[in-house]
């Protein structure tokens, strides 16, 4: 089960990287990595216990003395967002929520956070 989640997560991250690189080259999209105001990018994937990716999961990034950043996962289960440059990654808490589901696992590796949810 964990192996299948890792495979799905790796595939999704690779797909996300390809999508973002294509968007950056075409000049589309709202993210500008060169902006001095942008801090580290937080990203990850949301999936169920079987490794199936989940769309429309509400991902909340919370940092001390900052307004929370609320994101939704894409149809690929991916999310991406950031705070201002003065926010340190270790000061950011990531939570995942979806109606009818509960979060069973949150795996964090630096700025990447993957969430596992199951129906309740």
Image: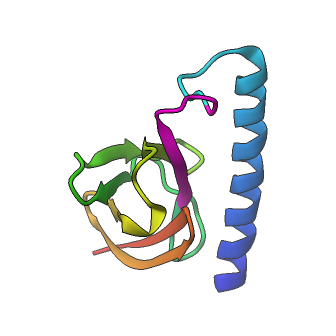
Measured from the top left, where is residue 101 in percent x and y? 31, 67
Q: Is residue 79 above or below residue 20?
A: below
Residue 28: tell me if it is visible.
Answer: yes
Locate residue 52: give its quadrant.
bottom right
Locate residue 106: give its quadrant.
bottom left
Please name whichever residue, 40 or 29, is drawn nearer the observer in this view of the structure: 40
Which residue is outermost to the top? Answer: 27
Q: Main secondary structure of the magenta part?
A: strand
| Residue in the image at 49% along x and 37% along y | 38
Locate residue 90: give its quadrant.
bottom left
| Residue in the image at 22% along x and 45% along y | 67
Please name whichever residue, 20 or 5, is drawn nearer the observer in this view of the structure: 20
| Residue in the image at 70% along x and 35% along y | 20
Which part of the image, by quadrant, shows the C terminus?
A: bottom left
Q: Which residues are magenta?
A: 33-45
- Horizontally, residue 70 falls left or right of residue 3, namely left
Which part of the image, by quadrant, shows the N terminus?
A: bottom right
- Residue 102 falls within the magenta-colored stretch: no
- Residue 41 falls within the magenta-colored stretch: yes
């Amino acid at each position: 089960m964990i192996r299948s989640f890792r495979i799905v997560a790796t595939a999704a991250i690779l797909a996300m990287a390809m999508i973002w690189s294509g968007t950056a080259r075409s000049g589309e999209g709202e993210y500008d990595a060169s902006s001095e105001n942008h801090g580290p990018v937080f990203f990850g994937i949301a999936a169920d216990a079987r490794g199936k990716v989940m769309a429309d999961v509400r991902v909340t990034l919370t940092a001390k003395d900052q307004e929370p950043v609320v994101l939704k996962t894409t149809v690929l289960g991916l999310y991406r967002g950031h705070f201002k440059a003065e926010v340190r990654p270790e000061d950011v808490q990531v939570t995942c929520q979806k109606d009818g589901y509960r979060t069973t696992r949150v795996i964090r590796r630096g700025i990447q956070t993957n969430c596992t949810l199951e129906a309740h």
